[in-house]
Amino acid sequence: MNRKTLVLPAVVGLLAPALAACGGSGSGDGDDAIAVGTTDAFAISKEVPAPFDPAYAYDAGSWSLLRQTVQGLMALPRAGGDPQPEAAEQCGFTDTGNERYSCTLRKGLTFSDGEPLTAADVKFSIERVRDIKIKDPSGSDALVANVEEIETQGDREVIFHLKSPDATFPYKLATPTAGIVSKDHYPKNKLRDGFEVSGSGPYIAEQEVDGDRLVKTVFTKNPKYKGEFKPQSDKVELHSFDDTKSMGKALEDGDIDLMARTMSPEQVRDLDASSDKKIDLVEMQGLEIRYLAFNTNAPVAKSKAVRQAMAQVIDRGALASSVYGPTAEPLFSLVPSTITGHANSFFNKYGNPSPAKARALLDKANISTPVKLTLHYTTDHYGPATKKEFELLRKQLNDSGLFDVSIKGVPWGTFRPAERDGKYAVYGMGWFPDFPDADSFIAPFLDKGNFLGSPYANPDIIDQLIPTSRREADRLAASKSIRKIQDIVAEDVPVLPLWQGKQYIAARDDITGVEWALNSSSSLQLWELGRGVSG
């Protein structure tokens, strides 16, 4: 295969890679560890005590590590589609109302330390996430908050009784939040502090730590693993880099074999144009979104007119093209364009950017201009282009004459707790879906106990539209409710969608399985990587 860039398209709203990467089949002999680079930073702090505890972890980087080591009842197939049994032998709803879900575990399951994995461990794991109370909740417990009771029958039967119908529940069981852990290593009523992580997944993890910072994780094939995945390498190393430049140099020098999150737009352009036949760039349709969020209780953001005026002024097309080039496209809804139920609600309401229309909105609400506010963003979580993005947002808003905007960037470890504590009126966030369904772009922001800790609560969305959409096993049939939610969001603007991104991996040409190494949530699937023949 001579093409430098492999483009993997989306099909029916799910990521379904269609082309194979260069190189032969993965040998799986494990003689040579595959080294993977990431700029995801992991550090222990008072604010982030347990980055890899399933009851706490709720970001793409942490989930990447958890997916290798902690097994779930369900998993998403590599080519997209409905979740399939993983630790389970079979699963399914046993009623017509999508409120009773039953699973049968595989025979002979054990944790990596050899201890048996039974239905009691599944019950312990899910109840622990649902019930554990921590000072700064990440929001991941919302994925299992609808579980009312877990019943076990013998060592292999698990029955979930849900509080309300939820056709998306199998997807939620495929997330690391619903991963199965041992009570011998994870306390019931508190987090497992530190970097250690263990389970029954395809790999066993060992960490290399410098002070309070994780620098490398070595994944060794778990000989006791029983599941659907077939690890193609006995050993994979995940190296954390301080920035994209040093990560890129390591790939060029052969110190690592592959780099993924987070490559800069400049790196993507350079690799796409490069004549270096030893490095392949793989492009995949992504489900990552970026948006502005509002603390609707904050004085400057409390007025809907201010939020609407910002939606009317911001030029998403210019933002995506100027900062991210071909790696992003404008987004006019929380739900990306490739997901069933998507509607361009913000474009339908606001059309093209117009300072004149924005002024009319503010005048009608008797809002004095310029409106003074600060946009907060994180400096080290979403890639190096974030600062440039917020500089352009500031310019667009200030050039309208309607706003007096300043920007402030802080590290993620400070940013995330401050955001959840309501200290920012307007702030920038990114989102990688828990699973490829519209519910994963709606409920985390708008339902009770939402990920943002947002005070915005619309009773029609919470009490009627989200429950109605979850009753529909046919997700196309759920689109009517989902589109109504998107229209309400465009009217009230508790969040302001900006752009939707693509996913990229750059790998040396002897690495196989690259086209499967990122799932729709932008989590790594390291078991897919093998080493073939260069050329």
Image: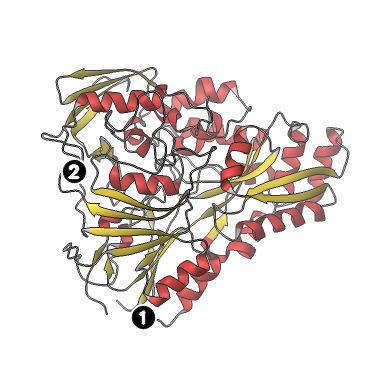
Q: Residue at x 29, y 45 (%)?
A: 69
Q: Amino acid at mark 2?
A: Gly
Q: Which residue is mark 1?
A: 277
| Left or right, residue 510 beside residue 258 | left
Q: Dot 1: within a 10 Å radius of its alpha carbon, few (fewer than 14), some, or many (20 or more) residues?
A: few
Q: How are the colours assigned in the image? A: secondary structure
Task: Measure the C-alpha gap from mark 2 to mark 1.
Answer: 36 Å
Q: Residue at x 71, y 50 (%)?
A: 408
Q: Residue pushed farthest left?
A: 107
Instruction: Give the residue drawn at x 21%, y 19%.
Output: 152
Secondary structure found at label 2:
loop
Of residues 240 and 439, which is closer to you in this image?
240
The residue wearing badge 2 is: 227
Pinpoint residue 506: horizontal percent, then vertical percent: 40, 68
Quadrant (top left, top right, bottom left, bottom right) of the N terminus: bottom left
Q: Nearer the viewer, residue 54 or 103?
A: 54
Quarter of the image where one finds residue 302: top right
In this view, the residue farthest toward the front is 211
Quarter of the image where the C terminus is located: bottom left
Instruction: Name the side, left or right, on which 328 lies relative to 302.
Output: left
Towards the viewer: 321 or 63: 63
Quarter holding residue 418: top right
**Secondary structure category for the residue under label 1:** loop
Disc 2 residue crowd, few under 14, some 14–19, many 20+, Cα 10 Å: many
